[in-house]
């Protein structure tokens, strides 16, 4: 079975498919890039240190004298003085931009197409990263982070949607994991750059790397095709079939895949259902099918069929963030400095490698063990390692602290990383998927903002009040315990369920 499955996957893959997925996932890669870009150089940017690794800086400046020669100018200072609250604001404003981008991306991609929407994200990424790189004060850097966040938020909506619409139906789960994997690649890239460039003014090259990635994405989007499913839903079925055939290959039989597509000028109910965020009404559906009415943002809350799903997806998204993963992704270098047996910047690269490796290794688990099982394993694992991390830091067990950090990140990839993003499409019918996804992503960015904004402030307050470090992870332990109870009681298992009625144990839908 394994050998046959692998052979089938390779038969379904074409160069055009790979190029399209690679170009589109550069958008989600930049989400990870910007999410973690301030982690390593935090103390350098805020003028607390001239370098996070004195030995490394000495080697760089001795082997590359020009690196030491760069001097700050009147309009481009070497660093930007700010306290913890100001830095937290700069970090968290990225998530506010993400919320704006996520809410605007759906309507834009529905009306104007996935391709135009992805090009818009590339433009926001370029502008945001350029402003960040050249920022001379807190306000300008916050503005750049906000614009980068808009691009990132839009990418989290458009990239998974585009991939699901161009990937072969039997491999959608596999290719769908590429979004999360590319985010982790972006985190690894920026953490590695941070280890080598967190000194003097070199930290600006870390932020400037976002311009280069966005430019590559923008160029790539000139050659990738529009989503065939979107074209078919907008009266261009013939063009959609040509593009799909090109993506699948000349020898691939696409008849089954395009069976529900109407002729040019028509859009059938099934295709509209697949395009979850589509706002246009179904036009000229076959007489045997019923008109599919999409529920709006507030309508899904009022609908008794979809309301439990809204509660579940919001709760799971809050659990994803409140278990504390972004305390490590965004603040680990400054947080763990002098508390661990190795350089915190070097450990952060190792953390990113563990995050990437476990995400790839664990990607089949939700299909094998079930979504709910993976969520509970992930939450319990993160809560346990958060407790171990808190105790090891408080009592000075440095090696145990390093192991606990790696375990903390590893358990995130088991369930809390990938599962929340697929629940929205499995807990409701097609008429409510778009609105449910909006609630889900909105909750994600609100929760991320809360952690990004208040974690460093609460961490400093607890350390000052109680003495020492690590006390904040007791809070994450308690939040994980509460999250486990919530998931156990409110989130149903969706693995192997043929429809939402079976997921929720209903015998008939309530009209």
Image (spheres, rainbow, N blue to C red):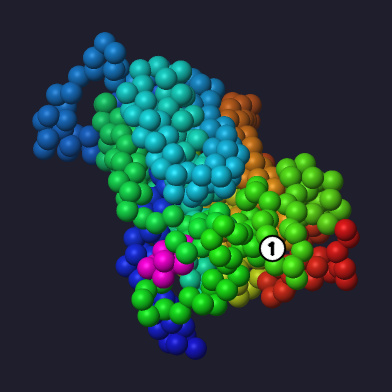
Q: Which residue is mark 1?
A: 285
18 up-or-down from 201: above or below: below
Whether residue 207 is visible: yes
**Does residue 27 sit above or below 464 in this rendering?**
below
Quadrant hosting residue 224: bottom left
At a point 34% along the width and 29% down the height, the residue shown is: 130
Q: Is residue 15 left or right of residue 471?
A: left
Q: Residue furthest top?
A: 74
Task: Name the one closer to the observer, 452 or 469.
Answer: 452
Residue at 26% x, 31% y is: 202
Q: Nearer the viewer, residue 349 or 187?
A: 187
Which of the 4 image quadrants contains residue 99?
top right
For this rendering, which residue is in front, 97 or 114? 114
Query: Residue 31: x, y in percent?
Result: 45, 44
State whether residue 445 appears in this view.
no
Q: In terms of depth relative to the viewer, which is nearer, 197 or 458? A: 197
Q: Position of residue 150 (x, y in %)?
A: 50, 35
Report crowding for label 1: few under 14, some 14 to 19, many 20 or more residues within 10 A (C-alpha): some
Magenta span dominant secondary structure: helix
Q: x%, y% of residue 122?
A: 39, 40
Q: Which residues are magenta?
A: 240-247
In the image, residue 246 lies in the stretch drawn in magenta: yes
Q: Position of residue 149 (x, y in %)?
A: 49, 35
Where does the C terminus fall, quadrant-wise? bottom right
How many numbered tags mark residues here? 1
Q: Is residue 197 left or right of residue 359?
A: left
Q: Residue at x 37, y 80 (%)?
A: 251
Query: Which element is circle 1 on?
Result: loop
């Amino acid at each position: 079975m394994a050998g046959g499955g692998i052979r089938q996957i390779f038969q379904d893959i074409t160069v055009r498919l790979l190029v399209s997925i690679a170009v589109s996932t550069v958008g989600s890669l930049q989400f990870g890039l910007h999410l973690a870009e301030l982690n390593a150089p935090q103390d350098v940017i805020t003028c607390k240190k001239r370098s996070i690794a004195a030995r490394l800086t000495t080697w760089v400046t001795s082997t590359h004298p020009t690196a030491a020669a760069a001097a700050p100018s009147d309009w481009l200072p070497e660093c930007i003085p700010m306290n913890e609250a100001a830095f937290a604001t700069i970090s968290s404003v990225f998530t506010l931009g993400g919320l704006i981008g996520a809410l605007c991306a759906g309507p834009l991609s529905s009306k104007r197409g996935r391709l135009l929407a992805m090009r818009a994200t590339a433009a926001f990424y370029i502008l945001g990263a350029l402003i960040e790189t050249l920022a001379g004060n807190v306000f300008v850097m916050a503005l750049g982070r906000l614009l980068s966040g808009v691009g990132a938020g839009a990418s989290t909506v458009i990239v998974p949607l585009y991939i699901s619409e161009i990937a072969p139906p039997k491999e959608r789960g596999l290719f769908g994991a590429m979004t999360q994997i590319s985010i982790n690649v972006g985190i690894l890239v920026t953490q590695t750059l941070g280890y080598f460039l967190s000194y003097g003014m070199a930290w600006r090259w870390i932020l400037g790397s976002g311009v280069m990635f966005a430019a590559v994405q923008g160029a790539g989007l000139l050659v990738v095709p529009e989503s065939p499913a979107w074209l078919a839903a907008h009266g261009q079925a013939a063009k959609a079939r040509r593009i799909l055939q090109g993506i699948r290959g000349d020898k691939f039989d696409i008849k089954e895949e395009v069976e529900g597509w109407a002729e040019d000028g028509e859009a059938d109910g099934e295709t509209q259902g697949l395009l979850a965020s589509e706002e246009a009404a179904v036009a000229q559906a076959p007489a045997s099918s019923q008109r599919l009415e999409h529920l709006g943002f507030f309508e899904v809350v009022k609908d008794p069929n979809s309301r439990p799903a809204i509660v579940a997806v919001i709760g799971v998204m809050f659990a994803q963030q409140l278990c504390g993963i972004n305390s490590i992704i965004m603040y680990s270098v400054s947080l763990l400095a002098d508390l661990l047996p190795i350089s915190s910047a070097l450990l952060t690269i190792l953390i990113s490698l563990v995050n990437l490796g476990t995400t790839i290794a664990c990607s089949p688990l939700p299909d094998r063990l079930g979504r709910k099982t993976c969520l509970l394993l992930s939450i319990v694992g993160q809560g346990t390692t958060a407790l171990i991390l808190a105790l090891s830091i408080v009592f000075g067990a440095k090696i145990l602290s390093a192991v606990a950090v790696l375990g903390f990140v590893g358990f995130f990839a088991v369930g809390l990383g990938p599962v929340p993003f697929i629940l929205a499409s499995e807990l409701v019918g097609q008429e409510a998927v778009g609105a449910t996804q909006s609630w889900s992503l909105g909750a994600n960015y609100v929760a991320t903002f809360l952690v990004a904004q208040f974690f460093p402030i609460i961490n400093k307050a607890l350390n000052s009040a109680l003495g020492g470090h690590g006390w904040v992870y007791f809070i994450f332990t308690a939040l994980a315990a509460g999250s486990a109870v919530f998931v156990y009681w409110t989130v149903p298992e969706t693995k192997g369920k043929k429809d939402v009625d079976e997921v929720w144990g209903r015998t008939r839908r309530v009209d």
